[in-house]
Image (cartoon, grey):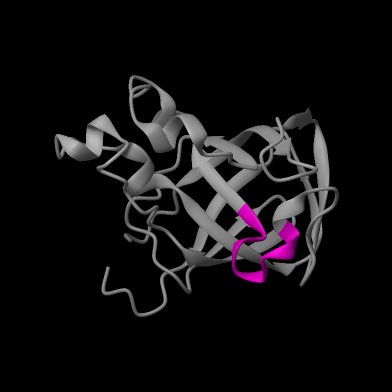
Amino acid sequence: MSGDKALGKVLAILLYREKGMPGKSVKSVLAEETWGLEGDWHKENKERQITILPREARQGNQEGFCLKKFKENIQTTGIDFSQICPGDQIRIGETVIQVTGTLKKCYPEICSLAARKEHCSLKEQCVFGMILRSGRICIGDEVEILEDRGSGR
């Protein structure tokens, strides 16, 4: 990462009460350290308490199986997550998130993009994380990558 900090914005917040159920759009949510997002089932998985995806990853790429099935909690704009690595930290509003994973597994047996070895923005742009510092996340909050710990960038 360069010395210039890239800032993005939160466009949408989605909570999923149960796995496989449709998300509920909310204006804000409490993100609790070691607990996850209030009212979201992802909190059960400490390594993936929160999922983040830029809206740009969905634009113009509606064909992939995973992109149709992927359920992000936070949808952002204006920030590129393609170079982020596990261990990096992201600030959203007053909340700090540690990145625990970045790559979504591909399924060439059921995904036409993967079968044709075509570009999938989900594979490069999705972020999984856990809450390091509690806070409220609101639509319109700034999104900032805070650290790149030893990722060689």
Please report the bounds of the magenta region as a residue range: 43-50
Image quarter where the C terminus lies is bottom left
Residue 98 on image: x %, y %: 58, 68
- In the image, taking residue 35 as reference, residue 131 lies left or right, namely left
Q: Is residue 12 left or right of residue 6?
A: right
View extreme (front): residue: 109
Of residue 117 and residue 10, the one placed in the foreground of this image is 117
Q: Relative to residue 128, is residue 34 depicted above or below?
A: below
**Depth check, front residue: 92 or 67:** 67
On-image quarter of the N terminus: bottom left
Can you say whether 95 is above or below 6 in the image?
below
Image position, residue 67 (x, y; %): 43, 34
Quarter of the image where one finds residue 115: top left
Residue for point 85% across, 48% down: 39
Image coordinates of residue 84 in percent, x first then y, are: 39, 60
User: Which of 109/131 is in front?
Assistant: 109
* Image spot of residue 20 (x, y percent): 66, 39
Residue shown at the point (45%, 48%) measured from the top left: 126
- The main secondary structure of the magenta stretch is helix
